[in-house]
């Protein structure tokens, strides 16, 4: 689905990460794995360290911290926000939604709307499109978009196909109505045929948490997980990414009349370096325009990975001027979203762990 | 390409296959596993612009079976 939305701007970005550092090699050695193979995997896939949330810290906490820091940096009061959108697959509760909880924590006006989007790695672009629509056509002047997950809580320590990959983070972004006519060009898509490729089977309404015992089952590679753990078919995820992301990127660039040469950067969902470099190459972008080192510092941060990569790679230029950027997220669902737009100048609060003292 | 040429190209991109022949069972390769499957998928995509799936690769018993997936 294509949409072009005008009269909006990205006004600010912030990301708060988990405060605990996990090291890929150290964790693997603790499980008795071979160092040579671990180093080889680290080199090939691009795994080094990741930041995970301290016990008791949720995506809501991380996003609240990011939102507070962003509002401070922008000199804005929470009462100026007309809507809050919360993108997450790890909400505090099944009811109420995280957006309402954040609405209460920040003290937003009762006239401000609050709703969640249940999306993962594509979620920031989906959320950005919804926020832009609210500003352009929905009566909002300023929308707070929060996106984040604590996926490290869903993996089994002995599942090497998922556990070393994920970091925890929460992001906050401000989207505002403006007189600028330059359009943001979006391409959103989904393919439910791939729904089982990334899944936590147990814990929802279909298979409630107490519906059966959590039996640990090893797979062909010796990875262990139970039905309430995140399960991911790595090969299928990789194929999906190669199949769907490049056409979505090409479509938004075509609508925006962007060329690779005239585009300042392609920011992909930071799944891992292996996926980013391959998808980036297939999109026709040189490596220097495709940031891929965020994931080696923080892990795969689900819907917070794109804002984290924007801050990590583009803080200086984005703070000072406008950049032509193409963003693309892809993952659970299957779902994907791409946007081509001019972003900046904008207020950026630096990437920080939360809580700071942990 | 002949099977020998395909095997040589595979060994060039994925050194897990160095020393293997068409008759080598994949399960006997020292590092056969999810990383190897990913690297095979990447090899097919970059070398042949060919999409192969994880189950297709997993379904192969020998290196020769893998080579049969290639054009």
Image: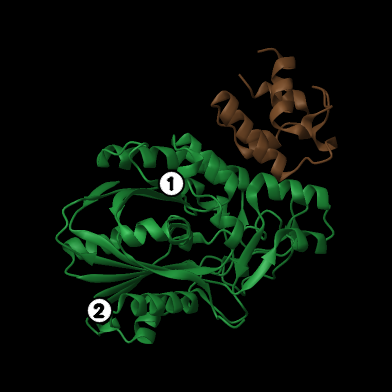
Q: Nearer the viewer, residue A163 or A93?
A: A163
Tag 2: Cα neighbours inside 10 Å, few (<14), some, or many (≥20)? Answer: some
Q: Nearer the viewer, residue A4 or A285?
A: A285
From the top left corner, tell me how far across and down residue A201 is, in percent: 58, 61
Q: Is residue B71 left or right of residue A99?
A: right
Question: Going from the N terminus, do you reach mark 1 or mark 2 first?
Answer: 2
Q: Quadrant of residue B17?
A: top right
Identify by letter the chain in brown.
B
Question: How is the model colour-coded?
Answer: by chain
From the top left corner, tell me how far across and down residue A328 is, in percent: 41, 49
Which residue is labeled 2 in the image?
A112
Point 51% across, 42% down: residue = A240
Q: Is residue A38 left or right of residue A324?
A: right
Location of the C terminus of chain B by quadrant is top right
From the top left corner, tell me how far across and down residue A252 is, in percent: 31, 42
Q: Are marks 1 and 2 on the same chain?
A: yes
Q: Is residue B11 left or right of residue A203?
A: right
Q: Nearer the viewer, residue B31 or A353?
A: A353
């Amino acid at each position: 689905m294509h949409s072009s939305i005008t009269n909006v701007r990205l006004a600010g970005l912030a990301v708060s990460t988990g405060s605990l550092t996990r090291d890929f090699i150290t964790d693997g050695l603790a499980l008795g794995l071979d160092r040579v193979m671990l180093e080889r995997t680290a080199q090939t896939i691009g795994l080094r360290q990741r930041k995970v949330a301290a016990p008791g810290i949720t995506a809501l906490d991380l996003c609240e911290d990011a939102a507070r820091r962003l509002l401070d940096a922008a000199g804005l009061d929470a009462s100026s926000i007309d809507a809050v959108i919360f993108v997450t697959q790890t909400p505090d509760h099944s009811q109420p939604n995280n957006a309402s909880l954040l609405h209460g924590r920040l003290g937003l006006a009762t006239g401000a709307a609050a709703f969640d989007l249940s999306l993962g790695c594509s979620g920031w672009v989906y959320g950005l499109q919804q926020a832009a629509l609210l500003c352009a056509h929905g009566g909002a002047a300023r929308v707070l978009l929060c996106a984040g997950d604590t996926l490290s809580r869903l993996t089994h320590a002995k599942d090497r196909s998922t556990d070393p990959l994920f970091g925890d983070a929460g992001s906050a972004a401000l989207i505002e109505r403006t007189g600028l006519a330059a359009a943001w060009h979006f391409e959103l898509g989904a393919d439910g045929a791939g729904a089982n490729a990334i899944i936590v089977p147990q814990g929802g309404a279909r298979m409630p948490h107490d519906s059966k015992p959590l039996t640990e089952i090893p797979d062909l590679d010796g990875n262990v997980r139970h039905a309430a753990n995140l399960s991911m078919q790595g090969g299928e995820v990789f194929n999906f990414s190669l199949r769907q992301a490049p056409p979505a990127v090409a479509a938004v660039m075509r609508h925006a009349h962007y060329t690779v040469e005239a585009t300042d950067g392609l920011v992909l969902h930071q799944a891992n370096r292996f996926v980013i470099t391959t998808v980036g190459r297939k999109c026709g972008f040189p490596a220097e325009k495709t940031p891929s080192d965020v994931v080696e510092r923080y892990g795969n941060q689900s819907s917070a990975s794109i804002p984290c990569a924007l801050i990590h790679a583009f803080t200086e230029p984005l703070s000072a001027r406008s950049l032509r950027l193409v963003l693309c997220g892809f993952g659970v669902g299957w779902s994907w979203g791409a946007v081509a737009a001019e972003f900046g100048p904008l207020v950026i609060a630096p990437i920080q762990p939360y809580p700071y003292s942990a | 390409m002949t099977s020998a040429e395909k095997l040589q190209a595979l060994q060039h991109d994925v050194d897990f296959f160095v020393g293997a022949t068409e008759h080598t069972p994949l399960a006997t390769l020292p590092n056969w596993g999810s990383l190897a499957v990913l690297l095979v998928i990447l090899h097919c995509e970059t070398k042949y612009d060919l999409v192969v799936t994880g189950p297709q690769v997993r379904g192969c018993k020998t290196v020769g079976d893998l080579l049969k997936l290639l054009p």
